[in-house]
Image (tube, rainbow, N blue to C red):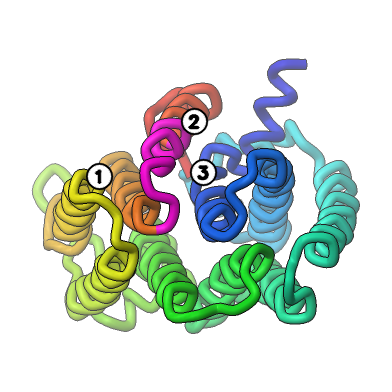
């Protein structure tokens, strides 16, 4: 029973739940800090994360992309530990049910349900478009998933606010650039050796080749691309902090996270020896620092326990699922 549960959690990449959770729970809590709806939204988002990431894994497998990727060889679909039939049944039923629940929460909670519903619809539509093929076939596949997550943030914001406002707009721009870097740079860097149609880094001259006893990553113009995207990302987070008026103590936390994100940005964009395990660790730390960066600005001191819970979950779940401090994906 335990092994089967682990296999399903691997399929849904449960270790990265904190990213989705914080991108939704923080803008919602900014306008609605009551504990019960926050906890209810947390449970909802856990299942949303599981189903949507499992769908991505399912299509990558059934369309043959993951079958040629050595890094995916130990995953449950590749090894037949979860059948395609069972995966489709669970994912499709789950996705339909969660869409209904999301619509019900929107009608029940949002002061502007029509606009919040638009966010929910775009989240569902563009996320599905990315999962079923654009992620691997389109050179612009990073755009639908960036719009998907931005719409997810818009849904959460309008679930507890009557208007977007300047703070909400800056937050959504931050979400867009967070996902843009994560998918179009980090994600493509992770899979650079697979020569996928959608990998824009190869179009910018990035490549990995044998060098001495190891492999060497040459970023080409992709280095400037990655630096530019993440710089805008960090700038938006710092702009959000200036609007927040939170304490100087939290300002120190924000400054530390900005420096941390910048350090890992440098590590990910420089020419270097390439070790995939090390790359995955650095990508994880970059993502953590970036997502944490806006928490103090939106929820103040509550951000500190949220960071601790998110980090503890991420590292503990990786140990349970992948026997490492990083996801083997």
Determine the CA span between mark 3 and mark 2: 7 Å
Mark 3 burial class by Cα count in 10 Å: few <14, some 14-19, many 20+: many
Camera-nearest residue between 233 and 242: 242
Q: Do labels 3 and 2 touch, CB within 8 Å?
A: yes
Residue under circle 3? Answer: 18
**In this view, 239 is above or below 28:** below
Residue at the image point whose x is 71% and y is 74% from the top: 116
Spot occupied by residue 278 in the image (x, y as percentages of width and height): 26, 41
Q: Is residue 210 visible?
A: no
- Which residue ends up furthest to the top in the rendered image? 1
Q: Which residues are magenta?
A: 298-310
Which residue is painted at 57% across and 48% down in the image? 21
Give the left or right position of residue 97, taking residue 267 as reference.
right
Q: Is residue 92 left or right of residue 27?
A: right
Q: Nearer the viewer, residue 178 or 187?
A: 178
Mark closer to the observer (2, 1)? 2
Which residue corresponds to mark 2? 313
């Amino acid at each position: 029973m335990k092994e089967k549960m682990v296999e399903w959690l691997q399929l849904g990449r449960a270790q990265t739940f904190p990213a989705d959770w914080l991108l939704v729970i923080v803008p919602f809590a900014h306008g609605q800090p009551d504990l019960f709806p926050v906890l209810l939204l947390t449970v909802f988002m856990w299942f949303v994360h599981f189903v949507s990431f499992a769908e991505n894994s399912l299509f990558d497998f059934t369309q043959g992309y993951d079958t040629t990727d050595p890094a995916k060889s130990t995953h449950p679909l590749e090894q037949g530990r979860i059948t395609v039939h069972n995966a489709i049944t669970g994912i499709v039923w789950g996705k339909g049910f969660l869409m209904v629940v999301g619509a019900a929460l929107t009608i029940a909670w949002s002061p502007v349900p029509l606009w919040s519903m638009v966010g929910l619809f775009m989240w569902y539509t563009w996320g599905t478009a990315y999962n079923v093929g654009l992620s691997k076939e389109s050179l612009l596949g990073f755009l639908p998933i960036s719009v998907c997550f931005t719409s997810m943030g818009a849904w959460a914001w309008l679930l507890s606010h009557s208007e977007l406002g300047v703070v909400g707009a800056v937050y959504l721009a931050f979400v867009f650039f967070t996902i843009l870097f994560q998918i179009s740079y980090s994600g493509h860097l992770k899979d650079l050796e697979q020569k996928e149609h959608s990998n824009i880094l190869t179009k910018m001259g990035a490549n990995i080749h044998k060098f001495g006893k190891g492999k060497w990553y040459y970023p080409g113009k992709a280095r400037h691309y990655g630096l530019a995207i993440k710089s805008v990302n960090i700038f938006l987070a710092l702009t959000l902090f200036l609007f927040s008026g939170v304490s100087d103590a939290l300002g120190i936390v924000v400054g530390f996270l900005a420096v941390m994100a910048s350090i890992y940005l440098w590590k990910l964009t420089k020419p270097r020896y390439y070790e995939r395990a090390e790359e995955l660790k650095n990508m994880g730390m970059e993502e953590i620092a970036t997502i944490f960066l806006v928490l103090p600005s939106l929820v103040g001191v509550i951000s500190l326990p949220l960071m601790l819970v998110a980090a503890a979950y991420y590292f503990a779940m990786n140990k349970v699922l992948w026997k490492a401090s990083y996801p083997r994906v």
